Every structure is written in structure tokens, then in C-alpha cells.
Image (cartoon, rainbow, N blue to C red):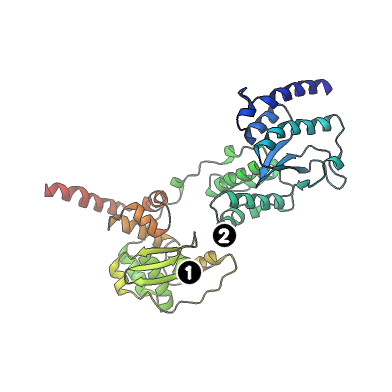
Amino acid sequence: MLAGWEIVEKYLKISNNTDKSGENLGKKTVSIDAINRRLKAANVPVRVRQHGNALYLRSSKLPPKPEDPVGKRYEMPKGPASQENLLRMEQEAHSLWKSVVEQRFNWPDHDHGVKSLDTVREWIARFEKHYLKTTDCSPRTFEKHWRAAVLNTLPQGSKLDRTLLLAAVLSTPDNTRKRKQFCQKLTRLAEFAGIDIDLRPYQGSYSKGSVQSRDLPKDAQIEAWYDSIPDERWKRIFARIVIFGLRPSESFDFELVDTHTARVIDAKSNEPRIIKAFHPTWAEAWDLDGQLPKINWRKNRKHEDITSRIANRFKCYDVTCQRYDLRHAWCVRVSVEYRIPVEVAAKWAGHSADVHQSIYNRWIRSDQQDQIYQEMVLKRETLQ
């Protein structure tokens, strides 16, 4: 082993003064990714990590503490995340691993502030803190789209490793949105935890274009549904969703500004959003303001519980469309019948222009496509 370390020491002398391309490190910055690539190439199972404003050396190959199992992953704090500290981290990683190989490693020399991270629960908690700090994701969105959808399905008390991650992915149906979602989100978790695993081969062939088609209701059907709802409170909820293209739960955070304008609290951003009525004649004729049905919801599950309750109630009244069909119909109506620019319509709807086009407007019916052609092409040629 000592002969092997002569090679490592030679490499260390080079890496102390040059980066991968041979340039002097004293004259430029160095990245954590570059350091970790060199450590991997040198077969040193120690990695540099940054959490907040602190640097750490991480490894699962250190001798375990008496109370810990073999393979426990530890993190050793190494000071603030400055370029000065970063420049010496590579050498410290080599020195640490050399002490292990030469059986000189002693926990009392390194135990100050060392954290052992191993279980799924521990890694998720740290990943959540990191993700919320480094992205625009809100705690509620993380809870819904990360924890509830994927992370909470993992065995929280188990060790986070390659086997567990792959088993979680393979537990989902092939070629589905759920499989793709698991692969993408667990890849991010694995990268954060320093677990080398490629889940892309298991992702499958799911795409937005493979989802089941929607048969959006026509205006006559929508009007018939409105007339058939016997309870005025639920009729009011139905009217709000239809006329303003709301997400179902937004119908309870609703304020009528004027006959054709409403303000809601966006279910995604939790910020106020202004929306316009389409059709305006429906807003003039239908009852939008007044008493609403009483719905109870669980803490942190308001939007999901309200949406589920509305869907169940509408089903009782033979409103047979899918949950978001009325919202989809509003988006198509705005684009086809009123020619509202996508950017404006998307802002009213509370999503991006790309989402508006790729997800909502993809359900424009063939008769609506013919209508656009008649009005935008044939009539123009007639006028010429």
C-alpha cells in the first residue's frame, strides 16, 4: 500500500499547484466538482461537500465509531466555504485517506463536529433545506411535489444507498409519469448525498404527448351542467371555475372585482392573481357572489382536499368531466374564440406561456381548429 501512496503523494504535489488542465491554482479559482473528479480518479473515497457557508469532507469508508455500523457515512467540518479553504481541501482528503490506509486514523483526532448521515430521513431533511435555499421552490410545493409524491414513500429509517433508490424506482409502473418523476427526483437526492447511480435507463418512454387525451366539454354541455346543479352554493363554485378557468381550490379564495374581473389567491404561488371572465356573458348571467358550501381540510392539504371534495360533489350532480377539464376548456376558449395572446392568457391562468401552449392548448378540438382556419385564413382571402 505504501508504494501506492508514493504515486498519490506525487499526484498531491502536482494537484497542489495545478488544476486538471495544468494551470496554476494560485492564480484562479477552483471548483468542488473539479476536486471531486480528481479524488475519484485517484481512487480516494473522500469527497468535498458544501452546505450553506461551510465545507465538509465526506466519506463512508472511514473506520466506524464503536456505536456505528461499517459503512456509516460521516461528514467532517472543515471551515467556511472560501477559496483559501477550498484550495487545501484536496490535500486534506488525500491525507485523511492515507491515514486510513496506513491504519493511523484515530477518531479523537477528527471527532470535533463530525456528523454521521445515513438514514433516508436524515438525508431528506438536509436535502430539503438545501433545495429550498438554492431554488425558488416554496415549502408547500416541496411538500406536495417532492415529499408527498416521492420522498415520503421511501423507508425513512433505512440506509440511503443505491439498492434502496433503485428498488424505489422499480416499484413504480413502467413508462408512466410516476416512474419518470421518481427517476428525476431520486437522481437529485442521490447527487446531493454523493451516491453514484444512473437512473436514466429505468425512466422509460413516458412524455407529455403520451398522456390520455381529453375530450373537453362544449359550451352547450357546460350550460346544461350549470342549469342542472340544484344546490346554489355548488352552482356558484361551478360558475367560478368555468368562467375564470380556476384551479378548483382557487374557487374558495375568490373575490369579484367587477362583473368581468376576479382576484384569487394562486394555488401554486399563494400570491394574488387577476383573471378575466370568458365568456363575459356567463359572468353577467350567472351567480358568482354569495354563500359557499362548507368544506373542511387538513393542515397542509387544503388544495388537495378541496379539489377532491369538489370533484366528488360534481360527480354527484352528473358533471362527468375530469377534474381540470373546465380549466382546460377556459384556456382553449380564451385562445380560440377570443384570440388572447398566449402570454396574457397564461398570466391570467397562473402558469407559464410554455405550459399554456404545451399542456392546455394541445386539447383544441378539430372543430375549433376549423373555426380558426375559417376566420383567420378564408375570411381574409375573401376580403382581399
Q: Quadrant of residue 91?
A: top right
259 horizontally vs 130: left or right: left
Residue 266 vs residue 169, the one in the foreground: 266
Residue located beneath label 2 in the image: 140
Looking at the image, residue 168 lies above or below residue 294: above
Looking at the image, residue 47 lies above or below residue 230: above
Looking at the image, residue 78 lies above or below residue 8: below
Q: Quadrant of residue 191?
A: top right
Q: Position of residue 190 (x, y in %)?
A: 65, 43
Q: Position of residue 251 (x, y in %)?
A: 44, 69
Residue 315 vs residue 94, the one in the foreground: 94
Q: Secondary structure at mark 2?
A: helix
Residue displayed at 40% across by 59% down: 349
Q: Position of residue 15 (x, y in %)?
A: 69, 25
- Crowding at mark 2 (Cα within 10 Å: few <14, some 14-19, many 20+): some
Q: Secondary structure at mark 1?
A: helix
- Crowding at mark 1 (Cα within 10 Å: few <14, some 14-19, many 20+): many
On the question of residue 60 being in view, the answer is yes
Residue 286 vs residue 94, the one in the foreground: 94
**Amino acid at circle 1:** Ile
**Amino acid at circle 2:** Arg
Residue displayed at 41% across by 79% down: 290
Q: Nearer the viewer, mark 1 or mark 2?
A: 2
Q: Which mark is residue 310?
A: 1
Specify which label sits upstream in the sequence, 1 or 2.
2
Q: CA distance from mark 1 to mark 2?
A: 21 Å
Looking at the image, residue 100 lies above or below residue 68: above
Residue 326 vs residue 9, the one in the foreground: 9
Residue displayed at 48% across by 66% down: 249
On the question of residue 231 being in view, the answer is no
Residue displayed at 40% across by 55% down: 214
